[in-house]
Image (cartoon, rainbow, N blue to C red):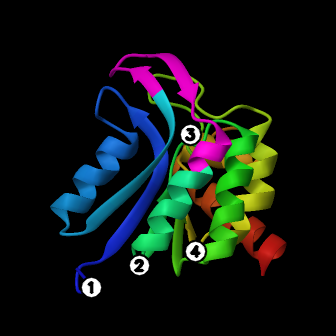
Amino acid sequence: MSDIPRVLTIAGSDSGGGAGIQADLKTFSALGVYGASVICALTAQNTREVRAIHSAPPAFIQTQLETVFDDIQINAVKIGMLADPETVRCVASVLRRYQPQFIVLDPVMVAKSGDRLLAEEAIASLCEELIPLATLITPNLPEAAVLLGLQEADSLEGMQLSCRLCSRWVHNRFC
């Protein structure tokens, strides 16, 4: 397996199969990548709504992470839905310890249905704990607006401005 890239997805489970762990593992497989996973939350959702979210206890998330890192040489980590500040802090702590080479952070905050997936109080933890560790951050327009404290861009010019401001914000804060 040493010649196959190994990527760990840390996210929520989407019972509808269109996002989260399920979508990540499908993508990894399609690209010929070995995928490992750490499930931080279970969602009861479909294409129209999120009916319920059950967060995994941080101690169990930590155990999942350590178990994977202790056995599999992970080349990259992709982070998705983390749900709450305790989970964000737990994931950040373990990643600081194991120091994977590449970390992609998708700051999943809201489902396509509009349902909230990240607690409001977790945004500060995300900014302070995980963004500094990330190699790449992939916010969508609503997530970029939340991170920047702005209205969501609704034009090409607004999108370009959001992109520049996100880049500048990350650079000024962490470089």
Q: Which mark is residue 73?
A: 2
What separation in Å lies between label 1 and label 3 (alpha carbons)? 45 Å
Q: Is residue 30 left or right of residue 69?
A: left
Question: Mark 3 is on which residue type?
Answer: Asp
Residue tagged by mark 1? 2
Local crowd at mark 4 within 10 Å, few (<14), some, or many (≥20)? few
**Considering depth in this image, is 104 or 9 the residue closer to the camera?**
9
Q: Secondary structure at mark 4?
A: loop
Residue 75, image x, y percentages: 42, 78
Q: Is residue 57 magenta?
A: yes
Residue tagged by mark 4? 135
- Position of 162 relative to 68 (above/below): above
CB atoms of marks 2 and 1 within 8 Å: yes
Q: Which residues are magenta?
A: 43-61
Q: Along the polypeptide, which appears first: circle 2 or circle 1?
A: 1
Local crowd at mark 1 within 10 Å, few (<14), some, or many (≥20)? few
Residue 146 image-quadrant placement: top right
Q: Along the polypeptide, which appears first: circle 1 or circle 3?
A: 1
Name which residue lies at 77% across and 65% down: 169
**Considering depth in this image, is 38 or 127 the residue closer to the camera?**
38
Q: Is residue 19 left or right of residue 150?
A: left
- Position of 104 relative to 146 (above/below): below
Name which residue lies at 61% across and 61% down: 163
- Position of 134 relative to 53 (above/below): below
**Considering depth in this image, is 64 or 11 the residue closer to the camera?**
64
Q: Secondary structure at mark 3?
A: loop
What separation in Å lies between label 3 and label 4 (alpha carbons)? 27 Å
Q: Is residue 156 magenta?
A: no
